[in-house]
Amino acid sequence: MLMTLNHSSLLSACQWFFSSDLPGIKNILNYFDDTSIHSGSDASSKNSTKPKSKLTSKNSAPKGICCRNCHARITQAKYAVEVEGQHQHTVTNPNGITFKISLYRHAECHAQTEAMSDYSWFVGYEWRIVTCPDCQQHIGWSYQKGHSLDFYGLISDKLIDFEK
């Protein structure tokens, strides 16, 4: 007999585990809950070799503003900044792709390109593409005037805020 295992059947079949102290099974069940709630819709995340959610207990859950794909911590709300009078901006690149970005003065990410000024969304700033340090997914851009980094524009849809 072939049995299909899905989230509901796994919960019913393992319900008795909740009455015992088996943290490994609880983490597996939490993984299914976290994945269904926090899964991103970005096509590039389907190519990632890392899981969308790390197996964690409630005591070791991610903190801060994290990569939606792998839950690596990227920044914190306390680093939010405003440029041109706003923290969040809706911008469109030359290919017609629109992004909602949030600005931060500090972020843990990797620059993937040399700084360039062409098509900058912020007058006088050069930009670089930045990626998540863990899964390498494109999460936004860093911006600088001269040689010092000024702020990051992070794609809101690529992040999940565990501070809320």
Image (cartoon, helix red, strand yellow):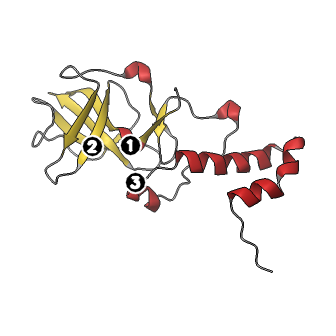
- Residue density around tag 2, few if under 14, some if 14–19, many if 20 or more, within 10 Å: some
Quadrant in the rendering for residue 23 = top right
Q: Position of residue 123 (x, y in %)?
A: 10, 30
Q: Position of residue 143 (x, y in %)?
A: 22, 32
Q: Amino acid at mark 1?
A: Asp
Please determine whether, in this image, residue 124 is positioned above or below residue 115. above
- Residue density around tag 1, few if under 14, some if 14–19, many if 20 or more, within 10 Å: some
Are circles 2 and 1 on residues that touch, CB within 8 Å?
yes
Quadrant in the rendering for residue 51 = bottom right
- At mark 1, the secondary structure is helix
Are circles 3 and 2 on residues that touch, CB within 8 Å?
no
Residue placed furthest toward the bottom: 1
**Residue 46 can be seen, yes or no:** yes
Exactly how many numbered labels are in the figure? Answer: 3
The residue at 80%/55% (across/down) is: 12
Question: Which residue, given by chain and number where applicable, does mark 1 sit on?
Answer: 157
- Residue density around tag 3, few if under 14, some if 14–19, many if 20 or more, within 10 Å: few
Q: Nearer the viewer, residue 47 or 7?
A: 7
Q: Amino acid at mark 2?
A: Phe
Q: Position of residue 108 (x, y in %)?
A: 41, 34
Question: Which residue, given by chain and number where applicable, does mark 3 sit on?
Answer: 42
- At mark 2, the secondary structure is strand
**Residue 53 can be seen, yes or no:** no
Are circles 1 and 3 on residues that touch, CB within 8 Å?
yes
Q: Position of residue 41 (x, y in %)?
A: 43, 53
Q: Pick whichever of labels 3 and 2 is earlier in the sequence.
A: 3
The residue at 43%/23% (across/down) is: 77
Please determine whether, in this image, residue 40 is positioned above or below residue 77. below
Q: Pick whichever of labels 1 and 3 is earlier in the sequence.
A: 3
Q: Amino acid at mark 3?
A: Asp
Question: Which residue, given by chain and number where applicable, does mark 2 sit on?
Answer: 99
